[in-house]
Structure formats: C-alpha cells, structure tokens
Amino acid sequence: MTDETTTPTGVEPDRSDELLLPELVAHLRDHRTQLRQQWAERITDAHLLSSMTNQEVFSEATSVYDNYVEVLETGSVKALQHYARDLSERIIPRGVETHEVVGIVLLLRDVLARSLFEKYRDDFELLNQVLDAYEPAANRIANTVAVSFVEQRERVIRDQQDALLELSTPVLQVRERLLILPIIGVLDQDRAQQLTEQLLRGIRAHRAKLVVIDVTGVPDMDENVANSLVDTVTASRLMGADVIITGLSSEIAQTLVTIGVDLSKMHTVGDLQGGIEEAERQLGFRVSKVPDAD
Amino acid sequence: MPTDARAAPHLPLPASILKQGPNLIVSIHTALDDEQLLRLQHDLLERVGRDRARGILIDVAALDVLDSFAARTLTDLAYMAQLRGARTVVVGIAPDVAMTLVRLGVRIPLTQTALDLEEGLEWLGA
C-alpha cells in the first residue's frame, strides 16, 4: 500500500486510508437496505441458517450488517465480539452449525466487496486502495465472529459435560442405611475419582452402612479403573461402610483375573437384585411377600 | 505450637481420653504431631491396663488431615491394644481424609472403622 503512494504515477489526487475508510463506510450506510437484502437472499440461496425463519434471518442480518459497518468505521471489534457472543448464545440451542456462521459472514464480505467493485470499477487504482483498506478489516470481522461462536460452543459443551458428570453418578438410598450406586457408561480415572467423592459424601449424609455398587452398565474395565474401584471400596470402609459390587460381566471378570487385579477383598454378588438381597440380610431386613398380594 | 510441645512434653495433649463403662473414648481435637501421636499411643496403652478397658474408640472427626504416620500409629495402637485385651475402632474419618489416605496408597488396614461415635459404640457393644 505504501508503495503505491510513493509511485510517480501519483498525479491523481492522493487518497489516503483515512479518507478512504469513511468513504467506504458512507457507501455501505447509503446502500444499507439494498445490500442487506442481497445478503439475506444469498443466505437463503445457500441454504444457510435453515433452522431459522426468514424473518429471524433478516433481523439478525440487519444487526450483523450494522455491527459490521461499525467495526469498519471504528476499527474496534469489542462491540462485535459482544454481539457475536450474544448471537451464538441465541442460535446454538437451535442447532446452527459452525460452517453456517462462518458461511454467512463470508457471504456478507463477498456482497460488500462486490458492491465496492461495482462502485469503483472505472478506477482500478482506487479500487485496489479501497480493497486494501477493506480486506484486513473484513477478515478480522470474520475471524472475530467465528472465534466467538466456537468459544461459545465450547463453553456450552463444557457445561454439558459437567452436568453429565453430575448426573451420571447418582447415589441413591434404597433402605435405611443402604445405598446403591449404579454406574452406567465408560469409567475413566476422572469419573472414578468423582464417583468416589460423591459416594463418600453420600455415605456421610445418609449414614450408610452398606453400599451396593452396580457395574452392569459398565462396558469394560481396565487395570486402572479396576484399581480405582478397589480404592473406592477401601475409602468407603474407612468411613465405616461396607461395599458389595454387583453386575460384573463375564468379560470384565475374565479381564480382571487375566490382568491380575486383586479383588479378593471385595465382596461381589452376581446381579443388583442379589446384591440388594444380600445387603438387606446383612442389615437385618427381611422382605416377605404378603400372602394375598395377588 | 508444636515446638513448644516438644520442649515441654508434659503439656496436655489436644486429645481427651474418657472412660465410659468398659470402653475408653478418645477424642482428638486438632492435628497431632508425630511426638504427640506417640504419646497418645503410650498413654492409651497405659490406661487400657489401669482401667481394664475392653474397647477403645478413637474419634478423628475433627481432623482434616491424617498422614501416613498417623494412620500407621493408629493401626499399631490397635494391634498393641489387642495384645492387652482391648479392641479398637476408629470413627469419624471425613470423606476427604478417606480419599487422601487411599490416594496416598496408605494400605495399612486401619483396623475397624465406623461412621461416627454412635456407630462405633454400637460396634463395641456399649
């Protein structure tokens, strides 16, 4: 860009960036309605944002457009960042994908660039200068929007992961002083750790004497997980609660014996029903059927 | 302060030993240093003989740390008391303490444990 200003061809009125950018902004403001319309049409043609209604697309398009022009004018992406985060928050739950968001911003960039081509098509030199001013700003905007969207999405995913982790290990009381802990899904070190913590707190809160840990829903188990299960049992014992493990599948049983995990100190029972029955026996409950129940 | 305690070993321990029927109830108020732990061990074994105790209950609910030395000392104490005719139950291990002990790999069988004082007394048959 600096080369051009120093070239001897500069007989024409020299128009620096400071003048070009306001001119550009003014152009975009003047043609706001028409360009915005064009853009919204191209979004629909490209089948982007298909999960939103045309009206919604148009009103978001208006906001994005105005923000876009403002960034070009001020050079600051602060407000845009804020808006993009806000927008992402609104559209992520509706299933809008990353490629759609990037797509619409790139479309806007193209629509605006074309209108600039159109306006300056007679003066190639000037067009070049305009584009020099326009392109970095436009790319920066695209970047900002995309990054904000992805960040917001990652935040949503993280929150959901946390929620899942909470939900995935319920500690339930089935009888006075008897807890069950059904484990469903793959156990890893983190989850085993978190599970142990929750169980220990549950033991204290419910004054449990016995815990039945059911691993029917655990597809497979490696040495680390088996050892952390042993740790869970040991820690529970330290708090005065005994543990019965139920639902070890034949595959897991074979694996555990093959890799040589010492489960001899663990009390295991075939299935959850058996485990609860055994626990009831140990706690002194006797469950009997009322004779005329059926 | 631990340094003072070491300088004057006959300061009262931050733990109380109460006789209740045939049992001794030990309540530890704050974290004990190694020297205090050994003193507690010694005092308790003395009391087992003097009071003809049949059971010892150690309440560690006030502790938020239990290091491997403390765990070891308590386990040793349980064995020693056994030799003098008293059985020991440790009660009130907090969830975090239990986790830490297991994570540190303290595999010492911490003798009998129970949730709290009430449970422990029940186990001792009080």
Image (cartoon, coloured by chain):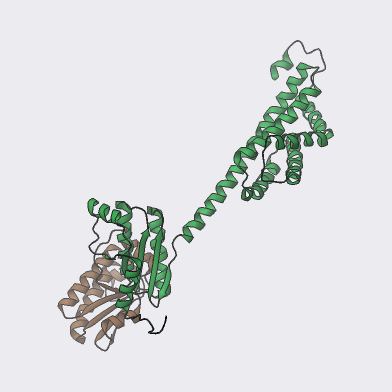
Chain colours: A green, B brown
**Residue B109, image quadrant:** bottom left
Q: Which residue is at a point 50% across and 53% down the rendered structure image?
A: A161
Q: Give percent across and percent down for residue A17.
A: 75, 25
Q: Which of the two residues, B33 or A85, is positioned nearer the viewer here?
A: A85
Residue reaching furthest to the top: A8
Q: Give percent across and percent down for residue A83.
A: 69, 45
Residue reaching furthest to the left: B83
Residue reaching furthest to the bottom: B21
- Can I make out residue B65 in this image? no
**Residue B125, image quadrant:** bottom left
Q: Give percent across and percent down for residue A274.
A: 32, 70
Relative to A61, say whether B68 is above or below. Answer: below
Q: Quadrant of the N terminus of chain B?
A: bottom left
Q: Is residue B73 left or right of residue A182?
A: left
Q: Quadrant of the C terminus of chain B?
A: bottom left
Q: Is residue B30 left or right of residue A62?
A: left
- Can I make out residue A59 in this image? yes
Relative to B28, say whether A292 is above or below. Answer: below
Q: Give percent across and percent down for residue B95.
A: 38, 67
Number of numbered tags placed on the structure image: 0
Q: Is residue A49 left or right of residue A278?
A: right
